[in-house]
Amino acid sequence: MSARPLVFATRNAGKLRELRELVPEVEVASVDEAARRLGRDIPEVEEDKPTFLGNARKKAMEVALATGWPALADDSGLEVDALGGAPGVYSARYAEELFDAGQGLGKDEANNRKLLAALAAVPAPAQRSARFRAVLVLADPAGALGQEVLVAEGVCEGQIAAAPRGAGGFGFDPLFVLPDLGQTFAELGSAIKAVRGHRGQAMAALRPRLLAYLASC
């Protein structure tokens, strides 16, 4: 085990699992794993920027400085055209008011229910166009990148289904349909999502630079 693994600046188990599948040859530590190895707490980073890039940059830099390790951060979300691009950067907390409202809903289920309710008056699939967007940022506390950060973005176009379908994935995956395949990400599974998904596309763009950087450390 290397002294300085790549720490993924997230506590989202689904995102962590996806990243490890996308770069299996890289040792990736979660924030909590890094905290245990370092023997100190790593504060939660407040996602208060108005853009995916701003949030990803902030998370990567703060976690890199807190750990002394190179840090990779993701900020991603769903943009629904009929909702003016919402939920966007607020995707993870879109239905925050429902999480602890005594309805027994998990975060993903609450977010999905709120999205379907918001689109109830938009029945036509062509009018339910949406996209997943992901921004990945790599930061090094020692400045070994020769610049502040490395950045990559991935976008996946699709539509919002009329009801959840499939048992895989996380977040809005049960509602996000790839029109050419006619299935949701939750139905298609991780192998298809790794190629077609927003995070997979972002990692494909970042991967050569990430591996070159890690090889030079």
Image (cartoon, helix red, strand yellow):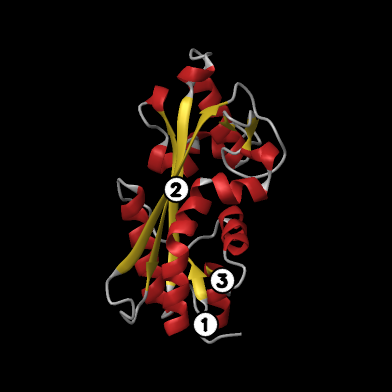
> Residue at coordinates 49% horizontally, 12% vertically from top-left?
121
Instruction: Bin the neighbour count of mark 2 within 10 Å (Cα to Cα): few under 14, some 14-19, many 20 and up.
Output: many
Picture residue at 68% right of the left edge, 30% below the top: 165
Quadrant for residue 136, please give it: bottom left
Do labels 3 and 2 touch, CB within 8 Å?
A: no
The alpha-carbon separation of the residues under discs 2 and 1 comes to: 28 Å
Q: Which numbered disc, 2 or 1, marks the residue closer to the eye?
A: 2
Give yes or no for contact between labels 2 and 1 (Cβ–Cβ under 8 Å): no
Q: Which residue is mark 2?
A: 76
**Amino acid at dot 3:** Val
Marking on residue 58? none
Give the labeled residue for mark 3.
Answer: 28
Image spot of residue 173 (x, y percent): 60, 39
Quadrant containing the N terminus is bottom right
Quadrant (top left, top right, bottom left, bottom right) of the C terminus:
bottom left
Q: Secondary structure at mark 2?
A: strand
Q: Could you tell me which residue is drawn at 63 percent across and 32 percent down?
A: 181
Read off the residue under disc 1. Answer: 38
Task: Say what secondary structure mark 1 lies in.
Answer: helix
Give the answer, above or below, for where 149 lies relative to 162: below
Residue 118 image offset from top left, x and y in percent = 48, 22
Name which of mark 2 and mark 1 comes first in the sequence.
1
